[in-house]
Amino acid sequence: MPESHNAALLAYVRAWSEPNTEVAKALLFRCWTEESEIIGPGYYFKGTTAVLNEIERYHTEQPGYKAIMTSSFDTHGYWSRFTIAMVKPDGTRGPEGWDIVEQDTEGMIRRVVTFWGPLPGPGD
């Protein structure tokens, strides 16, 4: 995968850890378009404004939290997956999950599908 694809993924993760709206916006513009979307359990965001509003809301409601990657990128074609965790201000881990990301040929993110929590066991 071209380096531009990894750089876009890193900018996306960093944007979620950035409490400064202007810095988060600059990071998001490196990887996001008005057609990009996030699909998660109980939420959906499309476009730059919607995601920036959610980042702002997140930092207002969870001050001091940061998003970190807990794995490397596992990539094939234009798809990547990686695990993430939210880290509380005291350094302990909060919610953990994983993202599946589709990118275009230039590395811009088309779609993020987020799952939170561990996978259920067979039959659960």
Image (cartoon, grey):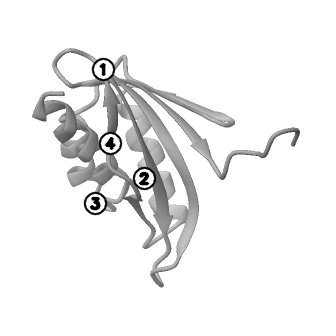
Q: Residues within 10 Å of mark 2 (few under 14, many from 20)?
A: some
Name the residue: 51% across, 79% down: 92
Give residue 121's mark.
none
State yes or no: discs 2 and 4 in contact (Cβ < 8 Å).
no
Q: Position of residue 42 (x, y in %)?
A: 69, 36
The quarter of the image holding the C terminus is top right
| Residue, disc 1 | 78
All told, the count of numbered labels is 4
| Residue, disc 2 | 56
| Residue 76 left/right relative to 88 | left
Q: Position of residue 103 (x, y in %)?
A: 30, 22
How far apart are labels 1 and 4 at the CA level?
12 Å
| Residue, disc 3 | 20
| Residue, disc 4 | 73
Q: Earlier in the sequence, mark 3 or mark 4?
A: 3
Q: Residues within 10 Å of mark 1 (few under 14, many from 20)?
A: some
Depth check, front residue: 71 or 20: 71
How far apart are labels 1 and 3 at the CA level?
30 Å
Q: Secondary structure at mark 3?
A: loop
The amino acid type of the residue labelled 1 equals: Tyr
Q: Position of residue 74 (x, y in %)?
A: 35, 38
Q: Earlier in the sequence, mark 3 or mark 2?
A: 3
Q: Residues within 10 Å of mark 4 (few under 14, many from 20)?
A: some
State yes or no: discs 3 and 4 in contact (Cβ < 8 Å).
no
State yes or no: discs 2 and 1 in contact (Cβ < 8 Å).
no
Q: Earlier in the sequence, mark 1 or mark 3?
A: 3
